[in-house]
Image (cartoon, rainbow, N blue to C red):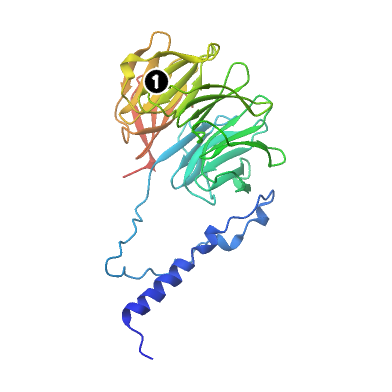
Amino acid sequence: MVVSLAFKQLLTTLAVVGLGLPFLTQPAWSTDIAAIDRTTITEPGIAPPPVPDPLPGEQQPDRSPDFRVSALLRDLGGNLWIGTWQGLAQIDPNTGRILARVPIPNLITTAIVQDKVGRIWVGTQEGLIRVDPRRKEVTAQNISLPANRVLSLLIDRRGYLWVGTDRGLVLVSPDQGLIMTTLQNLPGVSATALSLGIDGHLWVGTLEGLVKVDTAKAKILNQIPEIPGGAVQALSSDRFGMVWAATPGGLLEIDPRRGRVKRSVTQLRGRVINTIRFDRRGSLWLGSNEGLFRLNPYNGAVLGQIGGLPSNNVLAVAPDAGNKLWVGTSEGLSWVSLSDFRSRPHLAFTAP
């Protein structure tokens, strides 16, 4: 039987694609790393299988590295965890020295949080992962969520873990690694951002506004649907109990007692705000698709914009880590001196 060259190439392509199939088989929750399917781990030193030339009309996939830094966390020990689209790492923020690169099942990190006993929880586009910060390794992973794409993470006052997905909220017991309840009937569906209010209840940003959730009963208490800018992309609460919401149309201050928008920051109207964080001095740092800004939250004045970042598309900020402000962008990681407000790139996490 004569087999055409095109058919041989097709068989080779299918064989190569087939080698990736074990990655699509997600293991159930495991409290022991030994229970994770080790057949999905490539042994070091073994070259990957050859990739055949694309067939006529077939587009070659883009294999260039992605330097996005999408999540930052200062842990209880003062070290900085960096979530990128190439995996998870920990550095000493005082020196910038890399302390660890942690292999995780899915490289695209979306959120990081630390629970009250020190465990690191990592949200990815394919589920939730628990990392032991001392051993620097994954100890558990959970794919039994309403949706595997994790958008936000938060630890409440009781120490429970709230997981925001693109199909609602999940409450997890960090000690047992068990799902306690789910809340999938959120207005706006996707839990894109989480913040704890001064009363201990949860504020949830969705694609259609803001929702207040009782953390004890996992029930909706209030909804603020008419948010200028529509979707809420990030949330933060200040020391006076006000809730700040970042949207694709600017920055809003929410009065949680009255359940309404108190004001819109005039100087930021029309800007796409991706992330917001308060530093210990009370300044509010805002990452947008047009750069990094520092705001006086009391009068709404923009105090300045930081230049020299790897990219103007700012995705994450971490204030007060090693007496610096750390900034994650779409093209890498940078840090800002709080004395002269000049930025410097971290070359290990920045596109050349």
**Residue 319 shows up from this direction:** no
x then y, percent, for residue 123: 54, 41
- The residue carrying mark 1 is 251
Kind of element beneath mark 1: strand
Number of marks in the rendered image: 1
Q: Quadrant of the C terminus?
A: top left
Corner quadrant of residue 14: bottom left
Corner quadrant of residue 274: top left
x then y, percent, for residue 255: 50, 13
Q: Amino acid at mark 1?
A: Leu
Figure check: 237 above or below 112: above
**Near-viewer residue (344 or 283):** 283
Corner quadrant of residue 245: top left
Judged left or right of residue 56, residue 264 is: right
Instruction: Give me the residue at 49% from left, 63% from top.
Output: 20
Q: Which residue sits furthest bottom?
A: 1
Q: Quadrant of the N terminus?
A: bottom left
**Residue 230 shows up from this direction:** yes
Figure check: 107 above or below 19: above
Figure check: 71 above or below 324: below
